[in-house]
Amino acid sequence: VSMGLDWDVVHSANPRAVLATATTFGSTGPYAGRLGFDGIGQVMSGATYLSGHRGDPMKSFVPWVDYGTAGNLAIAVMGALMQRAHTGLGSHVEASLLGTALAVSGHALTEQAVTAVGRQATGNRHPGAGPSDIVPTRDGHVIVQVVGNPMFRRWCVAIGQPELADDVRFATDDLRGANGPALSELVSLWCAQRTTAEVLSELADGNVPAGPLYSPQQALDDPHISSELMELATVPGVAGPVPVVAPPFRLSDGGGCLGKESPLLGQHTNEVLLSLGYSNEDIAALRTARIVG
């Protein structure tokens, strides 16, 4: 905006241009123009209210709203480029933090609108299935997630209590969610007698999903993560290659690999502006006006 590059100006200068805009609340409505961060989306979407424990809401440490908004905007830009291939015209695409957070949390909002269930936070337990909880082992913690009657029966067999599959308290996912504390106690007792590796091995043998609770360092050290989901890259300001998370998708022709390293802030400003016809004097004036960095 400081450079006068709103949609009307961009579209007038180049009708094929695609302009991408990310905001907190969108460009229209009562909150348009207000500033905000990832956490605003988290708390206003209902997600934080349903996280943590009742009366003790817990915002996620990872900025999933920020990353989700960037992903949504990238998809929108690709859609705009495909549309331009047919119409010859660009478009203005927008994504907002609150819109992203609401999209991810939408099932809870729709459920509330239809059923008025008034769900409350249940910690790490899932309110609509079970057992689904993070529980301690002899040397760590694991998450066990069981959904659906066939999987529940497999879990009952895996822990040596097949009779639980016929317990009326656990006849459906909804009932297992409602009786989640009892199931969490059962899975906790079973896991507490085993190491994390033993829990994961025995549940995998029974085709029951489970995963270890990792610190960031443990995630880096995991052989599957390090070999399949990380890449070595050059990071500005860091000596030598460092492991970074690979793109979360793959293409059969090899696409999706990391490209050039991320530039430092303003590293290519002069190069880009000179290529657009700005003079060194023009660029110096833009820097003085704090329009570019």
Image (cartoon, rainbow, N blue to C red):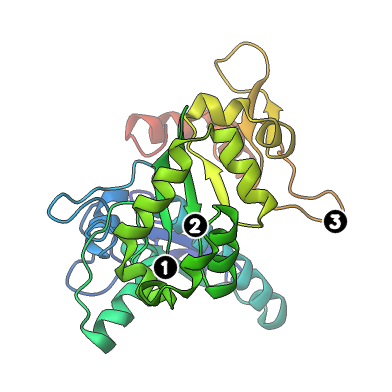
How many circles with numbers are drawn on the protein? 3
Give the mark, 3 or 2, whose residue is nearer the N terminus. Answer: 2
Question: For mark 1, what is the residue?
Answer: 129
Say few, some or many: other residues with alpha carbon within 10 Å of mark 3 (under 14 / 14 to 19 / 20 or more).
Answer: few
Question: For mark 2, what is the residue?
Answer: 145
Give the mark, 2 or 1, whose residue is nearer the N terminus. Answer: 1
Question: For mark 3, what is the residue?
Answer: 252
The residue at 42%/63% (across/down) is 130
Q: Which disc number belongs to residue 196? A: none
Say few, some or many: other residues with alpha carbon within 10 Å of mark 2 (under 14 / 14 to 19 / 20 or more).
Answer: many
Q: Nearer the viewer, mark 1 or mark 3?
A: 1
The residue at 66%/40% (across/down) is 246
Query: What amino acid is found at the position of numbered circle 2 in the picture?
Result: Gln
Give the mark, 1 or 3, whose residue is nearer the N terminus. Answer: 1
Q: Position of residue 236 (x, y in %)?
A: 58, 21
Nearer to the camera, 223 or 210: 210
Mark 2 touching mark 1, by CB under 8 A? yes
Query: What amino acid is found at the position of numbered circle 3 in the picture?
Result: Ser
The residue at 15%/49% (across/down) is 56
Decide: is 11 above or below 136.
Answer: below
The quadrant holding residue 84 is bottom right
